[in-house]
């Protein structure tokens, strides 16, 4: 009976949705801001679509792709002072005939886009003694036209010690006109609670015609005395501060006066923002105020903008509108992904829309002029009963476009053997769990989806012609347990992993009444306790809001003790890429492959083996030889345990 059931499962997938997205493209205005064969921003353009308008590589010939070149940066995690989350997550820019990327230990590299040969390299250096939780660089930003004579264009690089550098793309040298002759500005200016490494921008900054706009990350769950989550706009030529938006003082956006500081511990934006210069707005995905799992002391201003997407006026920095994705967030469900901007034809009317992926699995589709939902959003009642001194919101928003997984049950517990399945069932019964949004507790709460997210910083890819998107939902449960604090100094949750030197004591929440223990919900063998699949690819029609298809994605080849390529559906961290020919590319699954899919049906049609974990978002461009290239970075991820690497790899069709 066991053997028959196992064989039957190879041919039947109860989790699959089989269907098709529209094949015939809808006429769409060309994006004249970026040449078709180039990639000027993290999401290719300021709209964050991750869509390359190239069609040389097609579903019919993708199987002929060959490795065209392979570059090694020499920058791998494991150096003294590295935090666990030292990660190579860069998506290169393609400008002219060069690629530009950054590495975790703060090097900027220019490569020949056709051959992969190094054109120049600038090693910025990493100061010692940084209080780092993350050490990464997801990408650079680009100003196409500058009035500065020594830098007719600029690259912008945020550093791990809290600076923003302007570099000449031709040479890598600093642009002296920026920052009063220094070629950089100090992001610690006006920042409270100075602790080098505790605040910097892990994501590319936003570039407009006149401004460079910077958010930043603060340490999660270390203390209640962290830096500010202020969003700042600087003059793109001089680096002078133009406006600052501090969510605790949202209406006071004039540049901070000398001697003053921004509000400490305010919600921050660590992810990537998007811009619509025609509408005059920058769209900022906001995080939460630490500590993440206890919110008893949050102010009204903090509550207003936490875990929201906020539209700020480009000229003044004032709020034009905001949309909250989680009320009184106690689950670290901060908004993790760049909003994707796309114009939709709905009911015969053109709607300038914004698609916002969230950790809890919602895809909120909003009118980006007003923040009003394009597809319905309702408020659902949620479990109550917060920890002492805290409260819970009575309802939470749910979008009509949602990948919220079904609630877990004891019968959904899983294991490689009957013994670890039994341990998972016991653990399930011990934990508090009443469905999504079960509040954190001292008993221990099962959080599903976990704060790893159904979606994380990789976001989604949007096809503006077919008016659809390619998504990579991940379904993993986590455990959150509050630990009462009796003083403000004891290390309660570090155990044998106590930090060395300046590295922070994560999850101790100094200054709050509770520390927090956070972990994935796994068996004693380290395997997820919930039954697979744990990862999918999916296609959504943005006009109707319907999921056209969804398939489990990825194998356990690089996760299991025995490298069996069983297609169980594994988690993903890193974004997808779409092309005009109807292809999607993805490298972020926890097995080491770059895969290509038919975006119409979701069928996997090609894959190439990677030498390390591919936790980055691929990109595509046209080389000097006229060929279309697809580039993926394979560098691994520290906390996921994928193999470390320093690889930048490009594929193309044969010459």
Image (tube, rainbow, N blue to C red):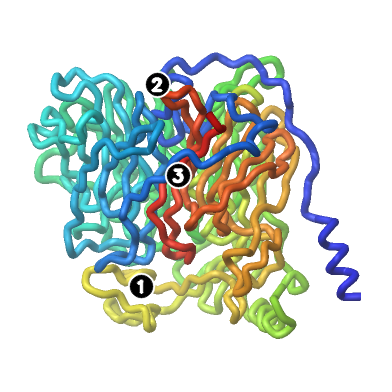
The mark found on residue 508 in the picture is 1
Q: Is residue 227 visible?
A: yes
Local packing at callout 1 (Cα closer than 10 Å; few below 14, some 14-19, many 20+) is many
Instruction: Determine whether 232 is above or below 32 in the image.
Output: below
Rendered location of residue 354, percent (x, y) = 54, 31
Q: Is residue 531 left or right of residue 7?
A: left
Q: Quadrant of residue 604?
A: top right
Rendered location of residue 298, percent (x, y) = 39, 57
Local packing at callout 3 (Cα closer than 10 Å; few below 14, some 14-19, many 20+) is many
Give me the C-alpha separation between circle 2 and circle 3: 33 Å
Rendered location of residue 174, percent (x, y) = 15, 35
Residue farthest to the front? 655
Q: Is residue 269 visible?
A: no
Local packing at callout 2 (Cα closer than 10 Å; few below 14, some 14-19, many 20+) is some
> Mark 3 = which residue?
649
Q: Quadrant of residue 355?
A: top right
Residue farthest to the left? 181
The mark found on residue 277 in the picture is 2
Q: Is residue 351 left or right of residue 130?
A: right
Instruction: Determine whether 25 is above or below 16 in the image.
Output: above
Q: Residue at x 65, y 59 (%)?
A: 555
Give me the C-alpha separation between circle 2 and circle 1: 42 Å
Q: Marks 1 and 3: in contact by CB < 8 Å?
A: no
Element carrying mark 3? strand
Give me the C-alpha separation between circle 3 and circle 1: 40 Å
Element carrying mark 1? loop
Q: In the depicted view, which residue is nearer to us: 38 or 509?
A: 38
């Amino acid at each position: 009976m066991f053997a028959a059931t196992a064989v039957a499962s190879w041919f039947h997938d109860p989790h699959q949705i089989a269907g098709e997205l529209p094949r015939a493209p809808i006429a769409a205005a060309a994006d004249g801001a970026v040449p078709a064969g180039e990639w000027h921003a993290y999401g290719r353009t300021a709209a964050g679509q991750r869509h390359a308008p190239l069609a040389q590589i097609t579903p019919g010939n993708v199987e002929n792709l060959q490795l065209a070149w392979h570059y090694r940066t020499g920058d791998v995690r494991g150096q003294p002072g590295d935090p666990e989350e030292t990660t190579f997550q860069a998506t290169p820019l393609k400008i002219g005939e060069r690629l530009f990327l950054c590495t975790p230990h703060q090097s900027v590299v220019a490569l020949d886009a056709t051959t992969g040969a190094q054109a120049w390299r600038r090693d910025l250096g990493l100061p010692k003694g940084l209080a780092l939780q993350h050490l990464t660089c997801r990408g650079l930003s680009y100003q196409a036209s500058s009035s500065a004579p020594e830098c007719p264009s600029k690259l912008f690089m945020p550093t791990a010690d809290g600076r923003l550098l302007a570099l000449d793309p031709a040479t890598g040298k600093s642009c002296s006109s920026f920052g009063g002759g220094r070629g950089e500005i100090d992001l610690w200016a006006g920042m409270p609670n100075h602790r080098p490494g505790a605040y910097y921008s892990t994501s590319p900054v936003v570039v407009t015609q006149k401004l460079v706009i910077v958010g930043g990350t603060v340490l999660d769950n270390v203390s209640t005395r962290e830096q500010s989550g202020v969003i700042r706009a600087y003059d793109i030529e001089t680096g002078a501060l133009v406006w600052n938006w501090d969510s605790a003082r949202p209406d006071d956006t004039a540049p901070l006066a000398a001697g003053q500081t921004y509000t400490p511990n305010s919600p921050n934006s660590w992810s990537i923002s998007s811009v619509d210069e025609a509408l005059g707005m920058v769209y900022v995905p906001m995080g939460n105020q630490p500590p993440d799992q206890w919110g008893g002391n949050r102010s009204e201003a903090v509550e207003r903008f936490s875990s929201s997407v906020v539209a700020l006026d480009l000229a003044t920095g004032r709020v034009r509108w905001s949309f909250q994705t989680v009320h009184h967030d106690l689950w670290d469900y901060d908004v993790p992904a760049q909003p994707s901007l796309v114009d939709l034809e709905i009911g015969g009317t053109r709607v300038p829309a914004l698609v916002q992926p969230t950790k809890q699995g919602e895809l909120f589709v909003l009118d980006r002029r007003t923040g009003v939902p394009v597809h319905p959003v309702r408020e659902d009642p949620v479990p109550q009963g917060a920890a002492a001194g805290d409260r819970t919101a009575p309802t939470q928003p749910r979008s009509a476009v949602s990948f919220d997984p079904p609630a877990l049950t004891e019968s959904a517990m899983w294991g490689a053997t009957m013994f670890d399945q039994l341990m998972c069932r016991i653990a399930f019964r011990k934990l508090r769990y009443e469905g999504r949004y079960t509040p954190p507790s001292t008993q221990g709460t099962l959080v599903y989806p976990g704060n790893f997210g159904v979606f994380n910083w990789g976001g989604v890819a949007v096809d503006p012609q077919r008016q659809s998107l390619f998504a990579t939902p991940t379904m993993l449960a986590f455990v959150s347990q509050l630990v009462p604090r009796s003083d403000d100094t004891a290390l309660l949750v570090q155990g044998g992993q106590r930090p060395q030197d300046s590295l922070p004591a994560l999850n101790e929440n100094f200054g709050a009444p509770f520390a927090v223990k956070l972990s994935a919900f796994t068996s004693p063998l380290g395997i997820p306790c919930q039954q697979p699949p744990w990862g999918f690819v999916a296609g959504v029609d943005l006009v109707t809001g319907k999921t056209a298809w969804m398939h489990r994605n990825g194998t356990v080849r690089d996760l299991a003790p025995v490298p069996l390529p069983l297609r169980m559906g594994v988690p993903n961290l890193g974004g997808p890429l779409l092309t005009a020919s109807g292809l999607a590319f993805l490298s972020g699954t926890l097995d080491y492959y770059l895969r290509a899919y038919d975006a119409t049906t979701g069928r996997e049609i090609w894959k190439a083996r990677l030498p390390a974990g591919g936790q980055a978002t691929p990109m595509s461009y046209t080389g000097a030889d006229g060929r279309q290239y697809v580039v993926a970075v394979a560098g691994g991820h520290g906390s996921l345990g994928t193999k470390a690497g320093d690889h930048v790899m490009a594929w193309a069709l044969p010459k």
